[in-house]
Amino acid sequence: MIAIPQKFLKQKMNIDKEFYQSIDCDALFKKIAMTQDPAHMVQLLFAEFPLAQFWRFSVDGKKQMKDSWPGFEAREPKYLQGMYSVWLAMLEEINTPLNSRGLLNYHFIATQHVEMKRLPDELKGCWRKEDVHFGLLDDNASVEGILALLDRIEIGDDTFLLARDNVSLVEEIEIEQYDIINSHTYQYVLNDKIDFLVRKRGMIQEDPKTKECAKRLLAEFILKHNYSFRTQQHEIYKLDSSETAIEIVTPTFVVEEFLQDRVDELIRLHYKRMTIANDSEQKLSIIVDTVQKLEQLHPFKDANCRIFVMVILNKLLLENGFPPCMLYDPNCFDAFSKEQLIHEVKVGMKRFQDVLLNDKQLENAPTVDVLSHEMDIYFKKINEMLRQKMEEILSGNLKIEQTFLPTFNISCTEKHDVPGIPEQGNKSGLNEKIVQLTIT
Ligand SMILES: Nc1ncnc2c1ncn2[C@@H]1O[C@H](COP(=O)(O)OP(=O)(O)O)[C@@H](O)[C@H]1O
Ligand SMILES: [Mg+2]
């Protein structure tokens, strides 16, 4: 255990006892009741945290007992090292509010040494240059979440669209002639044709009675048919003036500049909204909303989920006296509703408490046999560095400005499929191969 400096004597920050009780985290509350500021909270929380369990912040809860962190390492060598580095960077500057420059820096720290098929070096620490898309599947989307997206389309938000996966624009237009309602025309059809279309296309047996009912059926249809969420900054699809065809409008703006402005605006709004929030529930709702908007903007070509949902979400929670959270499935931020996300985050906070208090009872992460020796050395090395750096942070005695863990020389010697690695939803189209690592 690490001693807390004496200078932290009395509480200044508002830690909401009732909130902690409502999520069954009384024990956690007792530890941090006297928190002065976010840095102090980090000290109180992590002084007794079992650092051997720190990897659980960076591996989806539902993957922790499957192939776990070795699985992550196998797909993206040095994943955990990048995540430990960015977590430490985030924790050591927890008293400084987020800004977009810091965000780019976090992305760079988390990815710079990681071997990522989908993220070339020149895009590490940079905004993406093209549109992205991800599938809407049962684990990252819900009917309520899609309804919220439809509401945004309805009020004229054209920064994204929902479309059938793996279908080119031309095909989509063709499908549209014969088939289903497509979000390109959603705004148009909603006004006077939606219930007609819903009936006509056989989505249900009975007539939708109200617009709300029709929208819900549409959301169910979208989820059932694995539509994808597409960002839409590079090419914007519009109905032409006759409202019979879709035309592609290529904006003249630069995607990176658009993203820079959007991220700045989301962060500015976040802090402004936080100043007028009345209670913990409102604050949590704002935090969840900001993180979801950032995740849905998907400003990086890859590694959005780990930056926004694993790191930034926890930063914003800690800034406001909430416990950090370990989510069962961080992908839920893609397209769950706000209420569902708040529930997931609360469950994740309780999971953090469980790890903090029940270290001994936790089962170890299963290792993938073929990797176990090398991974063991790697894991011990990064944990040792984590411990050293955490001691500096907890003692308030930082030696280095920026946190970078030293690089290991890890080389890929073999590539093969490994049984036991569960099939992913493959929402990003990643090729799920495993790589054998050698650490020297
Ligand atoms: N190396 C990996 N192995 C297994 N799952 C991963 C790996 N890297 C990321 N994931 C998972 O893929 C999802 C997306 O994460 P990430 O790559 O950070 O963002 P993006 O949404 O931009 O692809 C998350 O559930 C994350 O836990
Ligand atoms: Mg990814």
Image (tube, rainbow, N blue to C red):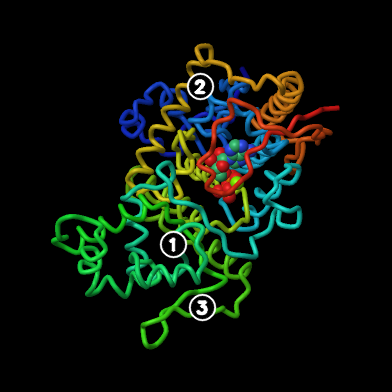
Q: Which mark is residue 248?
A: 3
Q: Is residue 37 left or right of residue 289?
A: right
Q: Is mark 1 within 8 Å of ligand 1?
A: no
The quarter of the picture where residue 389 lies is: top right
Query: Label 1, label 3: how many angstroms apart (C-alpha)?
Result: 15 Å
Q: Residue at x 81, y 36 (%)?
A: 407
Q: Residue at x 35, y 42 (%)?
A: 280
Q: Farthest residue to the front: give it.
A: 178
Tell me if I can see residue 324 in this picture. Answer: yes
Task: Give the crowd class for mark 2: few <14, some 14-19, many >=20 residues within 10 Å.
Answer: some
Amino acid identity at mark 2: Leu
The spot of residue 90 in percent (x, y) is: 62, 42
The spot of residue 320 in percent (x, y) is: 45, 43
Pointer 2 residue:
356
Pointer 1 residue:
163
Q: Is residue 357 above or below residue 254?
A: above
